Amino acid sequence: AQRVTQPEKLLSVFKGAPVELKCNYSYSGSPELFWYVQYSRQRLQLLLRHISRESIKGFTADLNKGETSFHLKKPFAQEEDSAMYYCALSRSTSWQLTFGSGTQLTVLP
Amino acid sequence: EPEVTQTPSHQVTQMGQEVILRCVPISNHLYFYWYRQILGQKVEFLVSFYNNEISEKSEIFDDQFSVERPDGSNFTLKIRSTKLEDSAMYFCASSEVADYGYTFGSGTRLTVV
């Protein structure tokens, strides 16, 4: 069965510092990977997906199949980036998402 | 921007009672989903729904659960006889195509007492 691991429950960085939220997965096939974000008191929102290879709000994520990772990065964190971030995986043969446990990012002034 | 709407935002029910959680997906979306998150735990998949039938369901989605799209706009999750362990945040989501770019609702917090 597939699994998504986000090793950090909490992560704090200072404004302007680089930030990396880690995500590792286990799945024997070709996964699709996503990052979702949940700002305080708001709904889960899709941030980005690996297949698009896009940058949203300055965030990027690269799928590394060798290391089975999909870490989320931003070179200069902003206070408004403070939120809960979830990494998620779907199998090519399924519509369901498997979520990681989430990382609460706090960007300090 | 179109939104997925869930009602109520919070529901308290007695153990053994039936509850219906309601969702209005985005109007041109064809795929619908329910997820739940027990406090302090991961977001878990319950069920996906397409073309008026269940496409996929998880082990959590047992005979106590059912989904329905009664009128072409609402999408409901029914729990027949609630248990304490059903207490969770329930999220509805929809997508235009099955490409996993979901739009989530803001959730219904179900508390079973």
Image (spheres, grey):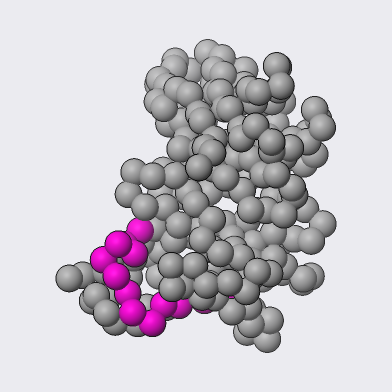
Q: Residue furthest front?
A: B1
Residue drawn at x 82%, y 57% is A93
A82 is within the stretch colored magenta: yes
Residue drawn at x 26%, y 66% is A79
Residue B8 position (above or below residue A59): above
Residue drawn at x 21%, y 70% is A108
A71 is within the stretch colored magenta: yes
Q: Taking the image as drawn, is residue B48 in sight?
A: no
Q: Position of residue B11 (x, y in %)?
A: 42, 22
Q: Position of residue A45 (x, y in %)?
A: 49, 52
Start-end of magenta stretch: A70-83
Q: Position of residue A86 (x, y in %)?
A: 49, 60
Q: Nearer the viewer, residue A68 or A18?
A: A18
Q: Residue furthest bottom?
A: A66
The answer to whether A13 appears left or right of A93 in the picture is left
Residue B48 position (above or below residue A73): above
Q: Nearer the viewer, residue A96 or B102?
A: B102
Q: Taking the image as drawn, is residue B109 in sight?
A: yes
Splitting the image into 4 quarters, where does residue A67 fall? bottom right
The answer to whether B17 appears left or right of A42 in the picture is right
Splitting the image into 4 quarters, where does residue A69 fall? bottom right
Residue drawn at x 80%, y 28% is B52
Specify the quadrant that holds the C terminus of chain B.
top left
